[in-house]
Amino acid sequence: MIPVLLITLPIFSGLMAFFMKGQSVKSWALLSSFAVLGISIWSLFSDANLLSYSQAWLPSLGSRFDLTMQDGLSKLMCLLTALSFPLVLISTQQNSSNQSPHFFALMLLTQAGLMGVFLAADALLFYFFWELALIPVYFLCSIWGGEKRIAVTFKFFIYTFVGSILMLVGILSLYYMQDTPSFAWSSLTANASKGIYPNWAFWLFFLAFAIKMPIFPLHTWQPDAYEQSPTPVTMILSGVMVKMGLFAAIRWLLPLFPKATEQFAWVIVCCSVIGMIYASLLAIRQDDIKRLIAYSSIAHIGLMSAVIFSGNASGMGGVMIQMFHHGVNVIGLWIVANAIEQKLGTRSLSEMGGLAQKAPTLSILLVVMSLANVALPLTNAFVGEFLMFNSLFKYNVWLTAVAGISIILAAVYTLNMVQKVIYGEVNSLTEKATDTPFNVNFSLVLIAILIVVMGVYPQPLLDLTKDAVTQLFAQQ
C-alpha cells in the first residue's frame, strides 16, 4: 500500500496542478510534497506487509505491477526523493519559473517517476518509470531553461534516449533468454545464477546506467544541462536523478550479471577514477558557480561508481549512505547558488566578493555546505567517503592513490569558491546585497542540521542499508 501511495499521490497532485491558477498551485505542490515525505517517513517504521504491492499488469507478457521497498536501499532513495522536493520548492519560491502551474505539475510528475524507479520489482515496469521520470524534465528544461536551453535539452535528450533504447533492448533480450519468460526481478535474478545472460547484454544495461550517473566519458551532457536548466530542476537532476543510475547498477546490473561484473569491473573502475580527477580539474577552472558544482558532482559520483564495482561489502554500504548524503549536500549547494543568483543576477565567481559582510547567514551556511562537500570529519559525507576509499584501497592500492588526489582537488575548488563568494572586499555588485529570506534559510538550516547529526551519528543509515548489502552479496 505505501509504495502505491508514494507514486499515485504525486501523479494525482501533478495532474490536478495543470488546472490550477495563481498562488494556490504553489501551496498545493508544497502540501503534496510534504504528504509524500510523511508517507516515506512512515515506511521506515511500517510492517513488511505494507511495503509491497503486486497486481496483474500485462499478464500476456509475464509482467506485473510489482512494487517493493522491503530493503533499506529503496527506503533510503524514496526518503531522499521525498525530502528533496519540499526543500527545492520552499527554497526557490522567488524564482520566475515557479510562477506557472505547468512547472509544478511537471515537477510532481517527475517525483512520481523517480519513486517508481526506486520501487519497481519488474523490469518492464522499471523501464516505464525510468521514462516517466525523464519526460517531464525535457519539458521543464526546454521551456524554463536558459538561453541555450534548446540545444542543451536536445543533447540531453539524445544521450538519455540512446541509453533508454539500449536498456529496453537489454530487458527484452533477457526476457526471451529465459525458459519461462518473465520480467520479474526475482525470476531474472534466479536465471542469472544459471549463467545464461551473455556479456553483451551487460554492456547494454551498463551504458544506459552510466549515461544517467554519468561517468567518464559519458558525462558531457551534464554540465551543460545543469547550467541551462532552471535551478529547481538542476537541484532534482543533481540531487536525485543521477542516483537512478547508481541505484540501477546496484539493484539490477550486479545481481543480473555477476560474472560480467567481475570480468569488466577494472574497466569501469578505471573510467570512474579518471572521471574523478578530470572533473575535479575542470571544477578548479570554472568561473560559473553552477558549472563548478556540476563538475564537483561528477567527481563524487565517480567515486561511488568505482566502489560499486570494487566488490566490497563495507564499501557498498558506504555507497548507499553516500547516495543519500550527496543528494542532501548538493541540493544545499544549489540552494546557495540559486540565492546568490537571485540576489546578484550573476553566477560568475569573479564578480562576487564580500558577501560575509552583507549576507552573514548565507555565508555561514555556505561554509557548512562546503565543508560537507569536502567530507570533513563530523560532517555526514565523511563516513561514507571513508568506507568507500577503504573499499577501493582493498581493490587496488594504486587506483586509490590516484583517486585520493581528488580529495585535495575538492578542497581546492570548494574553498576557492568560498573565498571568492564571501571573503574579500565588497564591490559595486555586492554592496546592495542583503541576507537571504526566511524560506531559503529554513531549507539551508534543515540541511545543516542533517549534515551535523548524520556526521556525528551515522549508525541509523548504516543499519537501514545493512539488509540490502547482505542480500546483494548473498546473491553473488
Image: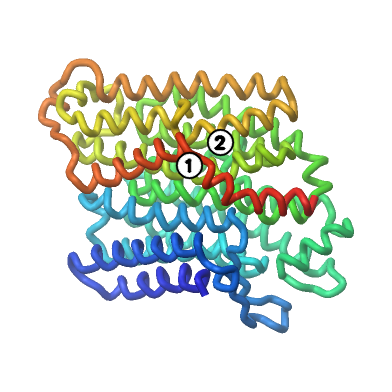
Instruction: State how far apart marks 2 and 1 are (Cα).
Output: 8 Å
The x and y percentages for residue 144 are 32, 54
Q: Is residue 209 visible?
A: yes
Residue 399 location, quadrant: top right
Residue 162 location, quadrant: bottom right
Residue at far left of view: 432
How many residues crowd around disc 2 within 10 Å: few (fewer than 14), some, or many (20 or more)? many
State left or right for residue 16 relative to residue 353.
right
Q: Amino acid at mark 2?
A: Gly
SS for tag 2?
A: helix
Residue at far top of view: 424
| Relative depth, front residue between 353 and 169 | 353
**Residue contact at pointers 2 and 1, CB within 8 angstroms:** yes
How many residues crowd around disc 1 within 10 Å: few (fewer than 14), some, or many (20 or more)? many
The scheme the figure's colours follow is rainbow
The x and y percentages for residue 191 are 83, 63
The x and y percentages for residue 21 are 21, 71
| Relative depth, front residue between 126 and 186 | 186
Q: Residue at x 62, y 33 (%)?
A: 388
Q: Which residue is mark 1?
A: 325
Q: Which residue is mark 2?
A: 384
| Relative depth, front residue between 410 and 371 | 371
The x and y percentages for residue 15 are 36, 74
Q: Residue at x 47, y 62 (%)?
A: 135
State left or right for residue 168 relative to residue 353.
right
Q: Amino acid at mark 1?
A: His
Of mark 2 and mark 1, the one earlier in the sequence is 1
Residue 14 location, quadrant: bottom left
SS for tag 1?
A: helix
